[in-house]
Image: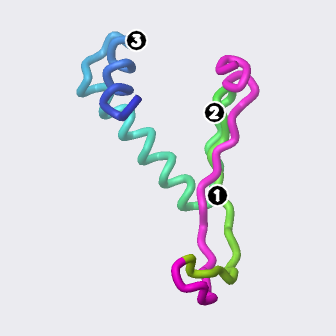
Amino acid sequence: MNKSDLIGKMASDAGITKTQAQAALNSFISATTGALKADDKVILVGFGTFSTSTRSARKGRNPQTGKEIDIAAKKVVKFKAGAELGENVK
């Protein structure tokens, strides 16, 4: 399912237009992104939790040359599925 499929499904399930569903989805994405940038968690009970983690700097190898390279530290997004989501997917 891609973004336009999700918008269509949201619109039909909620009885709203696709434009309204797109605005709602874009708002959710924007709010989630803003919270994660501020190092907050986004917890959706029954669905899951979005959070951030810092991956420390490390050494790696270039697979083509075998030369050792430095990989910089960075912030990554994590998602942990909630119990209800896990049960419904089984």
- Contact flag, marks 3 and 1 (Cβ < 8 Å): no
* Span shown in magenta: 64-90
Circle 1 residue: 52
How many C-alpha atoms fall within 10 Å of the one at disc 3: few (<14), some, or many (≥20)? Answer: few
Quarter where residue 89 is shown: top right
Secondary structure beneath label 3: helix
Quarter where residue 15 is shown: top left
- Which amino acid is tagged 3? Asp
- Which amino acid is tagged 2? Leu
Which mark is on residue 13?
3
Choose mark 2 or mark 1, whichever is in front.
Answer: 1
- Contact flag, marks 2 and 3 (Cβ < 8 Å): no
Tell me: residue 14, above or below residue 26: above
Residue 2 location, x and y as percent?
A: 37, 33
In which quadrant will I find the N terminus? top left
The residues bearing labels 2 and 3 have C-alpha atoms spaced at a distance of: 19 Å
The residues bearing labels 3 and 1 have C-alpha atoms spaced at a distance of: 31 Å
Whichever of labels 3 and 1 marks the residue nearer the N terminus, that label is: 3
Circle 2 residue: 44
